[in-house]
Image (spheres, rainbow, N blue to C red):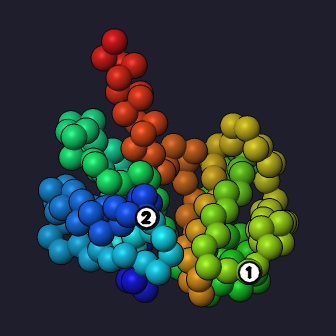
Amino acid sequence: MIRDFNLLATSETLTQSAASSELWMLLRAAGDEAPAVDRSPARGLVTARTSFDPVQAVAKLRERLRENPDHFKSLLRVIPVQRRVATEVGEIAGTAAAMATEIGDDESFRVTLEKRRTHLRSRTIIDAVAEGIDRKVDLESPDWVVLVEIVGRVTGLSLIKPDGILNVQKERYRLLAERQ
């Protein structure tokens, strides 16, 4: 597993190795000279380090998907990670609060959490993160998403727009709808 990852990708458990290769090739095709990609101990999870800003990397991969959807065979989702911290509630909440200063006074947010290989309770983490952000919560259509991705002892955090994760299946459906 790559410890200083700035991208996470999901796949089916049986296609984790193929997804790793696929992500590496797609990042190279997008212009990253030397991406690092590896399977993680969590089933169906791939870690990656790209030279691109992680949000830009997702945008570049979305563009490649629009151009060549057949190049995406094993990847299910690609998730940007802007910061990494130890998996401790206080550290997660403090980092999220610092990142959330980008949220405008009149904007809303939602906390989205995915846990892998941890016994921390979801509610504990979500409550701690939300308490530290003095903005309106909107679970249905927020302006921003505070993304918390726990992978064992390391937690990745991002402050993204609601469409900031590349969901390959949803994008394919969107492409089909646009073409019809």
For the point 22% across and 40% down, the residue is 70
Q: Amino acid at mark 2?
A: Thr
Name the mark on residue 13.
Answer: 2
Badge 1 crowding class, 10 Å Cα cut-off, few under 14, some 14 to 19, many 20 or more, is few
Outermost residue toward the top in this view: 180
Q: Nearer the viewer, mark 1 or mark 2?
A: 2
Q: Earlier in the sequence, mark 1 or mark 2?
A: 2
Residue 162 screen position, x and y as percent = 57, 44
**Residue 53 seen anywhere in this rendered image of the structure:** no
What is the count of numbered marks? 2
Q: Amino acid at mark 1?
A: His
Name the mark on residue 119.
Answer: 1
Is 27 on the left-hand or right-hand side of 13? left
Is 179 situated above or below 67? above
Is 4 situated above or below 172? below
Is 84 on the left-hand or right-hand side of 123? left
Pick the quarter of the image with the C terminus.
top left
For the point 55% across and 73% down, the residue is 156
Badge 2 crowding class, 10 Å Cα cut-off, few under 14, some 14 to 19, many 20 or more, is few
Viewer-proximal residue among 6 and 134: 6
Viewer-proximal residue among 9 and 33: 9
Q: SS class of the residue under badge 2?
A: helix
Q: SS class of the residue under badge 1?
A: loop
Instruction: Please identify the quarter of the rendering in which residue 24 is found.
Output: bottom left
Residue 117 screen position, x and y as percent = 62, 79
